[in-house]
Amino acid sequence: MRSRLAQRLQALKREAYALAIAARDPRLPWTARIVIALTLAHTFSPIDLIPDFIPVLGQLDDLVITPLGIALALRLTPPEILVEARARAEAEIARGKPVSRVGAALVILIWVALAIALLLAAIQTAARI
């Protein structure tokens, strides 16, 4: 059971990486690109929509949204783009674990921008009171 779960998680990770590669393909429809971006941002973001310390819901959030997002993105991505992206993903994974410092910096930048926007909104609301 445990090895089957590990295999499924590894396959999910490979598909997520293949989708990250596919997202850069200019032939990809914009709808698929948006679904991929949102799914990968949620998957790799250090901040959850529902925090993990909330019993059951925190973990359920990760266990449901990520696989559903990946499944939807796979359906929206044309097969020829998926074949090429999966081949590239396998080759890059075989060479070593892929690391994207630019991606990490982008996620951090987005969360900082959101935090600043929320802070400014809170300040404006407090000033009206």
Image: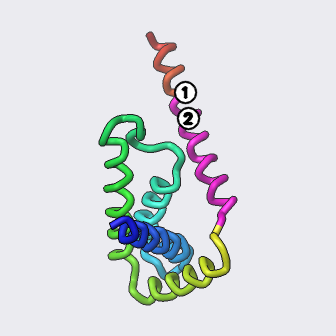
Residue found at x 48% / y 68%: 13
Q: Return the x and y of residue 14 as percentages of the image width and height.
A: 49, 74
Q: Return the x and y of residue 16 as percentages of the image width and height.
A: 47, 69
Q: Which residues are magenta?
A: 99-120
Q: Main secondary structure of the magenta part?
A: helix
Image position of 46 (left or right of 2):
right
Extreme residue toward the top, this view: 129
48 is higher (above) or lower (below) than 43: above
10 Å crowding of disc 2: few (<14), some (14-19), many (20+):
few
Residue found at x 45% / y 44%: 48
47 is higher (above) or lower (below) than 87: above
Depth order, front residue of 36/48:
48
Question: In the image, what residue type sits under mark 1?
Answer: Leu
Q: Return the x and y of residue 100 as percentages of the image width and height.
A: 65, 63
**Which residue position is annotated with label 1?**
119
Look at the numbered discs 2 and 1 and tell me whether their residues touch, using CB distance below 8 Å.
Answer: yes
Q: Return the x and y of residue 107 as percentages of the image width and height.
A: 59, 51
**Which residue position is annotated with label 2?**
115
Q: Quadrant of residue 9?
A: bottom left
Image position of 3 (left or right of 123):
left
On whether residue 45 falls in the magenta region, the answer is no
Image position of 92 (left or right of 18):
right
